[in-house]
Amino acid sequence: MTLALYARRKQWPLQAVTVRLEHSKIHAQDCEECETKEGKLDRIDREIELEGKLSDEQKARLMEIADRCPVHRTLTSEINIRTRLAA
């Protein structure tokens, strides 16, 4: 949704966006770019398909924007979950 809104605002010829995700658990020690080095981590592999007559520069910019969308930011930030019993 973020990519489509951005492309529409820029009047770029983006026709469709397809995002495919794959979730797995990996050992932290196997993740070179991760800060955590113990235990297991959740890994999400993301593939983004952009449809439309976009230039290489437009595609690159949309990939940058994908990393700034609210969902991506939430998933890559520290998450604190508090649970309570409903009254």
Image (spheres, grey):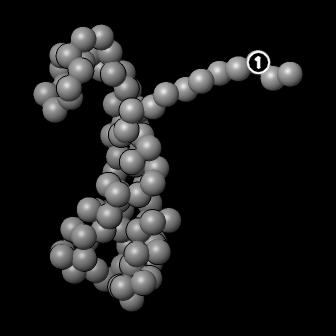
Within the image, what quadrant is residue 33 found in? top left
Q: What residue is drawn where x is 37% and y is 38%?
A: 77
Residue shown at the point (33%, 22%) measured from the top left: 41
Q: Quadrant of residue 28?
A: top left
Q: Please, is residue 83 above or below residue 16 in the view? A: above
Query: Percent from the top left, x then y, of residue 44?
Result: 36, 36
Type of amino acid under label 1: Leu
Visible residue check, residue 84? yes
* Residue assigned mark 1: 85
- Name the residue at the top extreme: 39
Q: Is residue 20 visible?
A: no
Q: On the image, which quarter does residue 29 sit in?
A: top left
Query: What's the residue at 39%, 32% (across, down)?
Result: 78
Report crowding for label 1: few under 14, some 14 to 19, many 20 or more residues within 10 A (C-alpha).
Answer: few
Q: Judging from the image, what secondary structure is the residue with disc 1 in? A: loop
Q: Is residue 83 left or right of residue 40?
A: right
Q: Using the image, determine if residue 40 lies above or below residue 32.
A: above
